[in-house]
Amino acid sequence: MKQQGIKHIRSAPYHPSTNGLAEIFVQTFKNAMQASENDGHTLITRLSTFLGRYRATPHATTGRSPSELFLQRKFRTKLDLLKSDVVTTVQDKQLEQKKYHDQHSKLRSFTLGQTVTVRDYLSSKKWMSGVIASILGPTMYKVKLSNGNVVVRHIDQMRDRQFADTEEENPFEYFTSRAEMTGSESSIESPRNSPPQRKTYPRRDRRPVERLMYPPLLKGGGMW
């Protein structure tokens, strides 16, 4: 397809409104130059300032500035320096999230060679004991299990060995029962080697609802 070039069409004599856009720009340019006469800058500086602001101003019809239409990107001005960039916005949000997280979280860490209990996803046991083999990061550890395997676990998947029991599904169940047994002074102490007693609850007597056992009566005394 042959591209069409710019065709110059002259307006009618003594009728400047035919080329109204050009006349409006000339008027805008003259007003800007006249308003900046007392700024103390040279004519070149005043002209560059005017053109920069004019080209960065969004057009009323297109909604985009002339520089954006020409360069296919937004023209950066001094006004953009007052706006926060993406990096600053992300950092502020992260600091705010950290602030709320630290209010409810507790600092946990393990040392090299410490005995721990970690989640096991390959066997029937839910927890297995192991030793910290290496520290990969603030929350990541490499643990050598009791069966010889080496796994990588997050700190949320680990417990201190002294607060866990590998034979139970819940590592805190033993100490919960112990706390219930020793919480009150009137409770009877159990033998030291006896297993923890689980708390039992009375059974509830469940009976069907009587209004659902019989059909409703009609107003005349009959039944459905």
Image: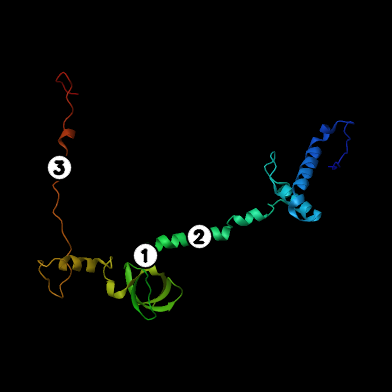
Which of the 4 image quadrants contains residue 208?
top left
- Whole-number angstrom distance, CA of label 3 to CA of label 1: 46 Å
Q: Is residue 120 visible?
A: no
The quadrant of the image that shows the C terminus is top left
Disc ID at residue 25: none
The amino acid sitting under disc 1 is Ser
Left or right of 201, for residue 42:
right
Q: Secondary structure at mark 3?
A: loop
Residue at 18% across, 68% down: 196
Q: Viewer-proximal residue, 20 or 140?
A: 20
Quadrant occupied by the N terminus: top right
Q: Earlier in the sequence, mark 3 or mark 1?
A: 1
Residue 72: % across, % down: 71, 50
Return the disc, 2 or 3, that comes first in the chain's sequence: 2
Which corner quadrant of the image does residue 222 belong to?
Answer: top left
Residue 142 percent across, percent down from the top left? 42, 75
Q: Amino acid at mark 2?
A: Asp
Q: Residues within 10 Å of mark 3 (few under 14, many from 20)?
A: few
Q: Between marks 1 and 2, how big is the CA–CA gap?
A: 20 Å
Q: Residue furthest top?
A: 220
Residue highlighted by disc 1: 105
What residue appears at the point 18 percent right and 27 percent down from the top-left corner? 216
Identify the residue position indicated by label 2 in the image: 92
Disc nearest the viewer among 2 and 3 = 2
Q: Earlier in the sequence, mark 1 or mark 2?
A: 2
In the image, 94 versus 108, the foreground residue is 94
Provide residue 167's location: percent of width, then percent of height: 26, 70
Q: Nearer the viewer, mark 1 or mark 2?
A: 2
Would you call the spot at circle 2 few (<14 residues within 10 Å), some (14-19), or many (20 or more)? few
Residue at 74% x, 53% y is: 39
